[in-house]
Image: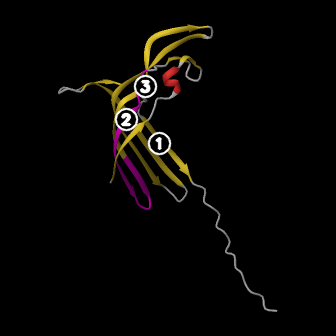
């Protein structure tokens, strides 16, 4: 198994997180920036494993990230009416959070060209509400759902290159 620990500092919030005030046309939402946001600091840990033989390849990784001052979009539970229509309102906020998850994949070779594949990914995020002796958590909004994927894969074989031979010609 491979283990990794790291600390990451994002030196400043993005401009949109600080000063957004209007419709985000790609997401069809109304976003409100927050100019009092602080830089994020995260402590990340993960453990990964790989296994491989002639027919099977498998990988799995679990992670846990603690992020101080994590910046996220929070639903305001209201609708903003504009000349372009009504849009759900979201505001940028910060909180200390814990993100945990798992990623796994497997590949089973059925023939030299055909393989069966599978992938699974899950992440959960919780806000840390109290850091006293009795720490409490609340779910982080807008986290993605679990992903499960299965499929067949066909690998085209590369054409074998003809052996080039170089010879000297006697005159």
SS of the residue under disc 3: strand
Q: Which residue is mark 1?
A: 150
Q: Position of residue 67 (x, y in %)?
A: 35, 33
- First in sequence: mark 2 or mark 3? 2
- First in sequence: mark 1 or mark 3? 3
Res 142 seen here: no
SS of the residue under disc 2: strand
Q: Which mark is residue 41?
A: 2
- Mainly helix, strand or loop, the magenta region? strand
67 is within the stretch colored magenta = no
What is the tally of numbered marks visible in this picture? 3
Do the residues under discs 1 and 2 have CB atoms within 8 angstroms? no
Q: Which mark is residue 72?
A: 3
- Neighbour tally class for label 2: few under 14, some 14-19, many 20 plus, Cα within 10 Å: some
Q: Position of residue 84 (x, y in %)?
A: 62, 11
- Neighbour tally class for label 3: few under 14, some 14-19, many 20 plus, Cα within 10 Å: some
Q: Which mark is residue 17?
A: none
SS of the residue under disc 1: strand
Q: Position of residue 7 (x, y in %)?
A: 36, 42
Residues shaded magenta = 36-60
Do the residues under discs 2 and 3 have CB atoms within 8 angstroms? no
Above or below, comparing residue 54 to residue 39 in the picture? below
């Amino acid at each position: 198994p491979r283990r990794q620990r790291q600390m990451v500092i994002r030196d400043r919030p993005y401009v949109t997180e600080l000063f957004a005030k209007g419709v985000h046309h790609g997401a069809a939402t109304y976003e409100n920036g927050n100019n009092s946001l602080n830089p994020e600091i995260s402590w990340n840990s993960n453990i990964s494993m790989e296994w491989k033989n002639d027919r099977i390849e498998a990988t799995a990784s679990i992670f846990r990230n603690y992020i101080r001052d994590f910046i996220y979009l929070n639903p305001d539970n209201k609708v903003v009416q504009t000349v372009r229509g009504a849009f759900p309102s979201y505001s940028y906020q910060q909180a200390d959070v814990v993100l945990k998850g798992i990623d796994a994949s497997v590949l089973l070779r059925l023939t030299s060209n055909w393989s069966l594949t599978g992938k699974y990914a899950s992440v959960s995020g919780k806000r840390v509400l109290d850091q006293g002796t009795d720490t409490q958590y609340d779910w982080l909004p807008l986290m993605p759902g679990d992903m499960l994927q299965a499929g067949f894969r066909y690998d085209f074989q590369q054409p074998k290159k003809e052996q080039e031979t170089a010879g000297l010609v006697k005159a």
